[in-house]
Amino acid sequence: MVENRNNRLLNAKLNKYIVPGIMMSLALQLGNIVDTIFVSNLIGVEAMSAVTMSLPVETIVQLTGYCLGVGGSIAAGNMLGKRDKEGASRLFSATFIVTLVVGLLFSLIAFPAAGPIARFLVSGDGVLTIYTRDYICISMLGAPVIGIGLMMVNYLGVENHPELASVYLIAANVINLVLDYIFLRFTPLGVTGASLSTVLGFLFAMVVFLFYIRSDKRNISFVRLNAKDFGIVKEAVVTGVPMLVFMATNFVKALGLNTIIMNQIGEDGMAVFTVCDNVLLIVEMLTGGIIGVIPNVAGILFGEKDYVGIRVLCKKMLKYSYIVLAVIFVLIMLFTEQITIMFGGGGELGREMVHALRIFALCVVPYLWNKFTVSYYESIEETAIASFVTFLENAVAVLPATFIGISIWKQIDGIGTNGIGVAFVATEVITLIAAWIFRKIKHKNSTFYIVPDQNPGTNLDFSIKSTMEEAGAVNRKILEFCKENGVSGNRANLAAVCAEEMTVNIIKFGGKTSNWIDINLCLEDDICQLRIRDNGVNFNPLEYSYDHEEFDIHGIELVKKISKSMDYIRAIDMNNTIISF
């Protein structure tokens, strides 16, 4: 195999996804953090604890939109990688309708269900129960809005619009921030206002989706569905199993942790846990956005069997993630006290928060690797491993670890709050080791990536700059490669002519954004397949027909005639053309 692709084109596109990914993750988590900070400082620590006590219900409200969004977008990415636009559109339409219907069902039961649920989560009918009830009620009423919002941001990532996803979530959280201050500072709404501002933020920001609907880069669109078409939702469910497991175990985790901490320590313990949990959300905001690029991109690369590209993607995302994580960890250790004060911690309770948070911060290193593991394996359809990691991390390990950690630490200092931090460190380390063992059992003698080291078949894989000088060498390279591998002269000439015609047209008409072209010629099972990627303007050669002399793209019709088949997709914001001979 010849392998000398420089990966600059893919790296450039990954850089484009990273900043919107971080912004999207930041905006997604910022709402919970902002609510917690405003509520703790403007209402009190009990109200802050109510926000945390509501997390099990928040998880269920988000479950459909988040799971179908993540699973559906990854499955749609795989379909687009295989050039199945129709299937991707049907999947998108079906998941949209299911998410909306489930959200409306939550809205219908909001008022009668909020009270009983709050009393189940918080024993008694005290102030904490009332705060929890009010917060839950509004969240359930806003379920359709939150569900559709979460579903759409995931599809936007795989649909060449990661920037729109981040703009939507940033807008939603800016609105949330402003309304939080107005409702909590100038109205008697109390904790209800905090929940209402989140829902309204998700709602008003939906104007951003209009830009997506009008975009000419879309591969996916709404289509009319029959009843039998909804069976395609299983594609999203199967691919989204790790996320479904994550959300389900998150519910168990939130409910279990709330119960254990309230019973063993009380409301002070909940306050300490809330601060630790929000710091983890801050880590998630920054590193999660980088790791979140993997599902958006790896699914498409996996569908194209570009295993070399998958490795480039993973190594780059891990490198960036751990650089950011190192900075965050240092800041947490240096400004622990200031962080606890920001969340309303003071006095003896504040000192307990500081000690517990410094121990808790040690869990972020293995936490990031576990998150990367889940994102990667669900993208290459290894859902068993991803689900195992998720289930172990969020249910099997964390609850007994928390119970044991608090019990042991209560024997040491009579308080037990440091046991919360110890439990989370133990959970992440146990999960990391167990995941390694599980992979070794399931895929003996495999590396972490599981997929082959190289792309299938015998490949000529190279990159050229978008210049006529370099385009002149394309024909020669392909002919030499075909001769070395025993390809017939006729087929070799067809491949060389097609590659030269396509690259010349990309250079002439690709626009200013076109600077690199990746060319891959693959010989596999008596099939000769040419794949060309470029980051020029959006152009589908299958839809092109002669227009006028000023825009006459020579050679496209010739390529169509001499090739066996020709496919095109705009994926990862690049033109991807595959020609078979």
Image (tube, rainbow, N blue to C red):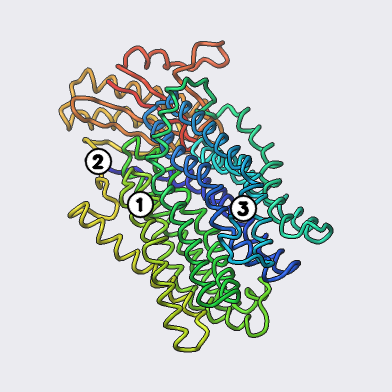
Q: Secondary structure at mark 3?
A: helix
Which numbered disc, 1 or 2, marks the residue closer to the eye?
A: 1
Image spot of residue 406 (x, y percent): 46, 78
- Which labelled disc corresponds to residue 27? 3
Under mark 1, the amino acid is Ala
Image spot of residue 355 (x, y percent): 54, 82
CA distance separating discs 3 and 2: 43 Å
- Which labelled disc corresponds to residue 386? 1
Q: Secondary structure at mark 1?
A: helix
The residue sitting at 27% across, 46% down in the picture is 451
Label 3, residues with CA under 10 Å away: few <14, some 14-19, many ≥20:
many
Label 2, residues with CA under 10 Å away: few <14, some 14-19, many ≥20:
few
Q: Is residue 6 left or right of residue 548?
A: left
Q: Quadrant of the C terminus?
A: top left
Q: Is residue 435 left or right of residue 413?
A: left
Which numbered disc, 3 or 1, marks the residue closer to the eye?
A: 1
Residues tagged 3 and 1 counted as in contact (Cβ below 8 A): no
Residue 555 or residue 177, whichever sits in front: 177
Which numbered disc, 3 or 2, marks the residue closer to the eye?
A: 3
The residue sitting at 52% across, 25% down in the picture is 509
CA distance separating discs 3 and 1: 25 Å
- Which labelled disc corresponds to residue 117? none
Label 1, residues with CA under 10 Å away: few <14, some 14-19, many ≥20:
many
Under mark 2, the amino acid is Val
CA distance separating discs 1 and 2: 33 Å
